Image (cartoon, rainbow, N blue to C red):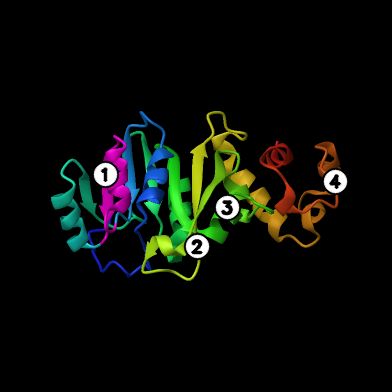
Amino acid sequence: MSSRCAGPHELGQNFLSDVSTAAKIAGLVPSGAGRVVELGAGAGALTAALVAAGHRVTAVELDPRRAAALRRRLGPVDVVCGDMLRFRADGPHSVVSNVPFGITTPLLRHLLGQRAWDTAVLLVQWEVARKRAAVGRTTLLTASWWPWYTFTLAGRVPARSFRPVPSVDGGILVLQRRPEPLVEPGERAGYQALVRRAFTARGGLPGAVGVRRLRAVGIPPDAVPGRLSAHQWAALHG
């Protein structure tokens, strides 16, 4: 965890101000999930909703002034002044975050490489939430982690729910670790290399894996990577 602390807008965060949205996000965290780690607590709207829902919360906040204000206002909360992109929690927990729009992908990569959490409820840009949940098409990032996680779009949050008001709406993205992975964790590097080739190779999927392999697992040779399901990706690897 970084010891550096900085101003609240260094990462372009728009603070959630809508109480009903905060309560909805808190309600998406499984009951009995143990500790909830909130990354980028800001002014504490989500923090307060999590506490009201009965969760034990560790709030990570980069701005020391806001961290101090959270300690004064929410006594039972463990407040850590630190960088969400460096913070790692020990032991089983869930993750909640109103993610600064400018660091959504780095934060996702940071979280997906960790093993201690089972559920993450993230407030991100609406279009980003749609893409990561594979609404319409799958992205390289989602396909790379699909065997181990599900990505679900859980709602749209109007821009007016934030302060300052951003130019785009937000979306609630829920990540859950699969109880039974579709690909063994030890095969992750090979699987992700396959996905990367499939998305970037000339000639599409046939150029990446060959027509024979596609037909062997029941995938049409003219299929595109962005249209494959999680189970098709796993079969293609297996």
Distance between the Cα atoms at labels 4 and 1?
48 Å
Residue 220 numbered tag: 4
Nearest the eye: 29 or 201: 29
Sequence-wise, the earlier of marks 4 and 2 is 2
Residue ID at (70%, 43%): 229
Q: Which residue is mark 2?
A: 169
The quarter of the displayed image where residue 204 is located: bottom right
Contact between labelled residues 2 and 4, with CB atoms less than 8 Å apart: no
Distance between the Cα atoms at labels 4 and 2?
36 Å
Contact between labelled residues 2 and 3, with CB atoms less than 8 Å apart: no
Q: Amino acid at mark 1?
A: Thr
Classify the position of the C terminus by image quarter.
top right
Residue ID at (40%, 68%): 165
Q: Residues within 10 Å of mark 3 (few under 14, many from 20)?
A: many
Contact between labelled residues 3 and 1, with CB atoms less than 8 Å apart: no
Q: Amino acid at mark 2?
A: Asp
Q: Secondary structure at mark 4?
A: loop
Q: Nearer the viewer, mark 4 or mark 1?
A: 1
Asked if residue 202 shows in the view, the reply is: yes
Q: Nearer the viewer, mark 4 or mark 3?
A: 3
Residue 132 numbered tag: 3
Distance between the Cα atoms at labels 1 and 3?
26 Å
Q: Residues within 10 Å of mark 4 (few under 14, many from 20)?
A: few
Q: Which residue is mark 1?
A: 58
Q: Secondary structure at mark 3?
A: helix
Q: Which residues are magenta?
A: 42-62
Q: Secondary structure at mark 2?
A: loop
The quarter of the displayed image where residue 35 is located: top left
Q: Residues within 10 Å of mark 1 (few under 14, many from 20)?
A: many
Sequence-wise, the earlier of marks 1 and 3 is 1
